[in-house]
Image (spheres, grey):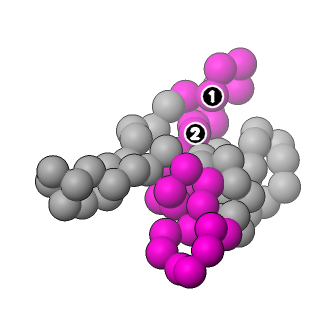
Amino acid sequence: MSHWDWKQNKIIRWPDKPVPGYSGWIHRDCGCSAGLEWGGEYPRECNRCRGTGAITIHKKSGVVALYPGGPFV
């Protein structure tokens, strides 16, 4: 999941990872802050990843879902 690196003064994202047991699918860092939206006056769950911090992408088709075969994002 993304995090803020205060030394480099930038957001650090995790690299893509294959989904175990589901060939052709990868987990990608959503870009939010560990499931929460960046900034704002109070913590709010990210509406893209639904608080998980990662989205799942089918490499061949480019379909984005919460998990392999799950609801589309």
Q: Nearer the viewer, residue 30 or 34?
A: 34
**Residue 19 covered by magenta stretch:** yes
User: Dot 1: what SS?
Assistant: loop
Majority secondary structure of magenta residues: loop
Residue 9 located left or right of residue 13: left
**Marks 1 and 2: in contact by CB < 8 Å?**
yes
Which residue is labeled 2 in the image?
27
Q: Amino acid at mark 2?
A: His
Q: Position of residue 57 (x, y in %)?
A: 61, 48
Please provide the residue range marked out in magenta.
Answer: 18-44
Query: Which of the marked residues, 2 or 1, is nearer the chain's N terminus?
Result: 1
Which residue is labeled 1 in the image?
19
Q: Nearer the viewer, residue 20 or 2?
A: 2
**Residue 38 covered by magenta stretch:** yes
User: Dot 2: what SS?
Assistant: strand
Q: Position of residue 44 (x, y in %)?
A: 67, 69
Q: Residue at x 50, y 57 (%)?
A: 33
Q: Residue at x 69, y 64 (%)?
A: 45
Q: Is residue 59 visible?
A: no
Residue 7 located left or right of residue 60: left
In the picture, the quarter occupied by the C terminus is: bottom right
Q: Position of residue 40 (x, y in %)?
A: 53, 80
